[in-house]
Amino acid sequence: LLMVEACTKSIVCPNKQIDPHAKFTAKGNLLESETYIGGKVECLETGVYRSDIEYKFEMKPEGFQSLIDNVDRDMTFAIEVEGGMDRRKITNYDEVRAEIIEKLELLRDRPNRMEKPYVYHIDVGAMYPNIILTNRLQPSAIVDDATCAACDFNQERNNCKRRMQWVWRGDYNPATKGEYDRTKDQLMRESRTNGSEQQFNELSEKEQAKTISDRLKLYSKNAYKKTKVTEEVTRTDTVCMRENDFYVDTVRQFRDRRYEYKKLTKVWAKRIGKAETPQEKKEAEDSALVYDSLQVAHKCILNSFYGYVMRKGARWRSMEMAGIVTKTGADLIVQARKLIEQIGRPLELDTDGIWCILPGSFPNIFTFKLDDGSTFRLEYPCIMLNADVHDNFTNHQYQTLKDTVTGIYETRSECSIFFELDGPYRCMVLPASTE
């Protein structure tokens, strides 16, 4: 798919990437393996959480005060950004605002209470694809100083370098580069290598690398009393905002097509109940099933755009990009957890969301009325998180090529990362046992 999309944009497909047989850290140590820190998954509480049983909540008043201070920001964000409407067209804005503030003030003034909970799963819709789209991430856009130095756009006023962090983790031999070279030199001088009939120089490059690694482990075991050191380092890399965006465009097309199929699934699901004849009902059921299958298939492929960049032998491969995606996702969930810890109880963190219980008196679902008679649904537990996400994770450097002849780019702010509300559920069971 990526090769076809690259071909249509006259992009030369790169060769499949091959790792060198011997790789070293910046300090000169022989690297055994390297990867990045993935998504954060953590179980915080265990037990049975039911919506009809009271639970103890010990909350922070400052958390509710912060929500009260930001209530206009959150509501305006929901109306204008998520809903795409003009706030002035809402006829009952003041009433909804007053109701939300009243509930938050009651919780702030008595933060310790026993209440029946809302059991919610708050997750980010298509998290990794939307992180890719928001930050214009693609393997070829991860650049170094040498690449930028050769670029015509390498000027500070262009603001085309986005610095992003990720966490590298590597296992390496404690022996120094000098000790590695001496070990290699020793093997080259030996008439036979590890009891084999071949000399070291007669071995293939792969076999030579393995022989040096095995001998170096034996040396490190005696000299350092260990054969492996594991280290985690937070690294910062540059993402080019002007790289040809064929990869990002491909992800966006798949995401938008999946959203279309999800909408059609809901449309045909509604027609099942409205069908007047068996034939109409059968047609609606078949269409709903087909569109649901299509959206699930697109979801699987959509999530593969992240996993592909770390696949061995991939043409477009980038550990840095994969690390940036997971680090950004983990930061999103950690930020949401900090707020939920103040106003409720987080139960479990998964890669793209949080299971939690909120007190039953917490502001929940509201309905805005518009001046044309239509309505707009407001999910308050969701919008309080989304407004924070857009304050902290919006890419203000997103650039799009507007004129291919003059090379003029348009800069805009981009953030397609949104939390979605699943629930409320009647019960959530978190077993203490891992099996």
Image: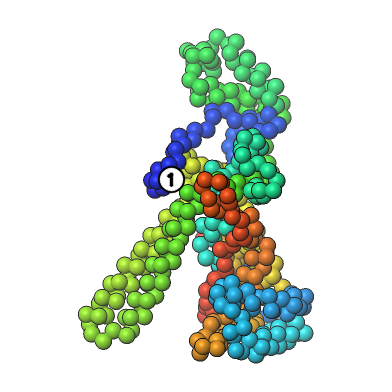
Is 120 left, or right, of 173 in this rendering?
left
Which of the pair 249/177 is nearer the observer?
249
Q: Residue at x 49, y 35 (%)?
A: 17
Q: Residue at x 60, y 46 (%)?
A: 240
Q: Which image quadrant is residue 418 in?
A: bottom right
Which of the pair 131/5 is nearer the observer?
5
Which of the pair 333/138 is nearer the observer?
138
- Using the image, determine if residue 426 lies above or below residue 336: below
Q: What is the x, y in percent for residue 81?
A: 59, 72
Secondary structure type for disc 1: loop
Q: Which image quadrant is residue 389 in?
A: bottom right
Q: What is the x, y in percent for residue 259?
A: 44, 66
Residue at the limit of the structure toward the front, as seen here = 406
Q: Residue at x 56, y 63 (%)?
A: 416
Is 40 left, or right, of 62 in this rendering?
left
Q: What is the x, y in percent for residue 284?
A: 29, 76
Crowding at dot 1, Cα within 10 Å, few <14 / some 14-19 / many 20+, comes out as: few
Q: What is the x, y in percent for residue 396?
A: 65, 58
- Using the image, determine if residue 223 lies above or below residue 418: above
**Residue 70 visible within the image:** yes
- Using the image, determine if residue 75 lies above or below residue 133: below
- Name the amino acid type tagged 1: Lys
Q: Which residue is mark 1?
A: 9
Disc tally is: 1
**Residue 345 visible within the image:** no
Q: Residue at x 25, y 77 (%)?
A: 282
